[in-house]
Image (cartoon, rainbow, N blue to C red):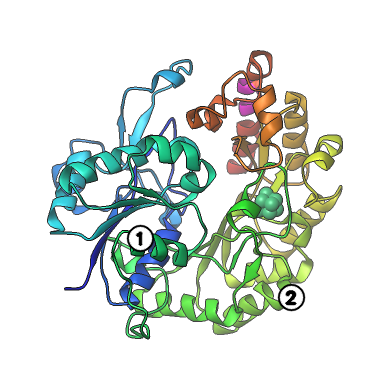
Amino acid sequence: MKPSLILINPWIYDFAAYDLWSKPLGLLMLATDLRRRGLDVHLLDCMDVDHPAMVERSSLKPPKRRQYGTGKFWREIVPKPISLKGLDRPYSRYGILPEVFEDDLRKVKSPSAILVTSLMTYWYPGVFEVIRRARKIHPGVPIILGGVYARLCRDHAVQFSGADRVESNQGIPAIYETLEGCGISIPNEAPDTTVPDYPAFDLLNKIRYICLMTSTGCPYRCHYCASHFLFPEFIQKDPHETLAEILFWHGKWGIRDFAFYDDALLVSSKSHTEVLLERIASLDLHLRFHTPNAIHVKEITKPLARLFYQTGFQTIRLGLEDADGSNRWDLDKKISKGDFAHAMDHLRSAGFDPRQTGAYIMMGLPGQPPDAVAETIHHVDRCGSIPYLAEYSPIPHTRLWEKAVACSTHDLSLEPLFHNNSLLPCWDNQKKSQIPRLKRLASHVREKYRNN
Ligand code: SF4
């Protein structure tokens, strides 16, 4: 009998969560590779907003969905972990009900192994909870934990997760090696070409949008970002492969919304993204593109902005982080003075409405004064875009990590829950007292554009 595997995307436990084109892309890629090798794959997505049992059985308020496939998740308020008691906000489990998850687990008879992914380090309570419940329903079945948390906080995951193995190496071959170590052999023969070689979105209950990754890694080395640790090499896919992927989902499934997950979508864009977009423009497909991961401001040229407009980009998020030059040079080299204003000029002349654009502004960096955030909000407004505050979350294995640990009053090394961006763990109380003012300022600018 061929091995049968359960792949799990765990719940999120947090103060806030929103489906901004969020899907477990790595897990869906793994599902495809396993299916092409002839294994049985069962995907259990705890974050599924379209789970039929939730609609039938849940007493929870159905999550509101917004445009382009985004929206809220199912949500239930749960007790806060003791270490987060200091923050006076409700803490929730986002996703399907635990009993619905357990029913799904029971439906898979005699799985060979259970593979669990993970994302943000401070979301580990959801990871632990799915492992605990999977162990209860399928005792004796090996559970392997991978993903971002497993890689960034390996020791913590090994010690506390309850998984049999923690996979902290990058890529699918590493997972296969671990499966082999658990006695599960992965067939090596030629892949089943009847299974398309794209992330297995068809295993979801409903496909509202497709997430694309045209490259992995990033050539920049911003001090607050773990991209280089998670993907040490910057590798771009052939743009024609991405085009084929888009045409597949659009042609066969009627999908119109595509979100780019790249860390560096616009690097070497002349031979990469521009080639892709030129082909899409010539096909007149009426698609909608979104860049929830910020794109590089300095790479936006006039022709590229025009291509964005022609091909139907609807949501453009730019990585500005901090307009204060003195702070910026310590942390990254991805943007120079004047770049943001130029990028916005190009986007505006191409035809974009300010409401389609937005700049992420990092708030809560070690040593960052609140006034620098306020100045950046004003700068975004002056340049005709919408500010989005992105609260800084300290990430292990980044260059800023040691500084973050040193300046935080929380024990970041010991407890990943303290990495939660809602805590702003690297700002003292005096700086934190400025947060309402900064949030009001950003929201005032957003309202101004919305009412225009
Ligand atoms: S440019 Fe973006 S993805 Fe690249 S290192 Fe900086 S923050 Fe990370």
Question: Quick one: SS at disc 2?
Answer: helix
Measured as percent of width and height from the top left, residue 409 is found at: 61, 18
Q: Which residues are magenta?
A: 435-440
Quadrant containing the C terminus is: top right
Label 2 CB, ligand 1: below 8 Å? no
- Please give the residue where the numbered disc 1 appears in the rendered image: 181
Tell which of 372 and 87 is nearer to you: 87
User: In this rendering, does residue 284 appear at all?
Assistant: no
- Counting residues from the start of the chain, the first of labels 2 and 1 encountered is 1
Question: Quick one: SS at disc 1?
Answer: helix
Measured as percent of width and height from the top left, residue 351 is found at: 68, 63
Above or below — where is 371 with respect to 208?
above
Q: CA distance from mark 2 to mark 1?
A: 44 Å
Tell which of 272 and 283 is nearer to you: 272
Quadrant containing the N terminus is: bottom left
- Residue at point 69%, 32% (across, down): 402
User: In this rendering, does residue 32 appear at all?
Assistant: yes
Query: Which disc number belongs to residue 270?
Result: 2
| Three-letter code for the amino acid on which mark 1 is drawn | Gly
Question: Is residue 438 magenta-colored?
Answer: yes
Q: Residues within 10 Å of mark 1 (few under 14, many from 20)?
A: few
Query: Which disc number belongs to residue 63?
Result: none
Above or below — where is 140 with respect to 33?
above
